[in-house]
Amino acid sequence: MIAPIILAQADILKDAALQFGYQGVLFWSNVISFLIVCAALQKFAYKPILVVLEERRKKIAEGLANAEKIKEQLAEAEAMHAEILNRANLEAQKMIEEARTSAAALAEKRQQQAIAEAEQIISKARDATQMERDRAFAELRREVARLVIETTGKVTGKVLTLADQQRLSEEAAKEIAA
């Protein structure tokens, strides 16, 4: 009883296949061609793309690590800059105190002259402090510009031209000044 049902089903499938234009040889040749194309794409396209993506991921991670290093170095440079300014301010305050003490110790006659000398010392101390600050700030700009150029060269993976280096240096100086 099962055999006639199976034969009837087979005839129905055969009729449907003929109606839709099914040809076994063409079907199997298409399946084999598809498998060959899949294997070729796997070997020659998919794997190389994965390798390139992995290299890119590594470069991005390296660039982020370099950016962190630059942030740390910038923080160190700013801390050093603040320390230099504090030291200069302390020295300036000390000089001001010394000038005021010596001015108070002078006789009434020489009081005007001592005050003038104290003001001169204060002015020199401020000038020295300003010069030290300017020097430290210029050094900070050069260091940040160098770090930006170096990191940009590493992240982009190319050698920067002199014009690129100059442009990056100017941009870094603008960022620091702001």
Image (cartoon, rainbow, N blue to C red):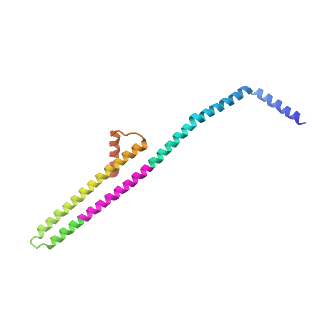
Question: Bounds of the magenta span?
Answer: 65-91
Classify residue 161 by image quadrant: top left
Is residue 42 shown above or below 110? Answer: above
- Does residue 178 appear in this view? no
Quadrant position of the N terminus in the picture: top right
Instruction: Indicate whether residue 85 is drawn in magenta.
Output: yes
Is residue 11 shown above or below 67? Answer: above
Residue 45 spot, x, y in % from top left? 57, 35
Seen at 12% across and 68% down, the residue is 112
Residue 110 spot, x, y in % from top left? 10, 70
In the displayed structure image, the side of residue 35 where residue 177 appears, left or right: left
In the displayed structure image, the side of residue 59 where residue 24 appears, left or right: right
Question: 82 or 20: nearer the eye?
Answer: 82
Seen at 35% across and 44% down, the residue is 168
Residue 154 spot, x, y in % from top left? 41, 44
Question: 151 or 118: nearer the eye?
Answer: 151
Instruction: Indicate whether residue 132 is drawn in magenta.
Output: no
Residue furthest left in the image: 109
Residue 69 spot, x, y in % from top left? 41, 52
Q: Magenta region's main secondary structure?
A: helix
Seen at 57% across and 38% down, the residue is 47
Seen at 32% across and 52% down, the residue is 140
Residue furthest right in the image: 1
Is residue 49 shown above or below 105? Answer: above
In the displayed structure image, the side of residue 175 where residue 1 appears, left or right: right
In the displayed structure image, the side of residue 93 where residue 74 appears, left or right: right
Count the marks: how many?
Answer: 0
- Does residue 2 appear in this view? yes
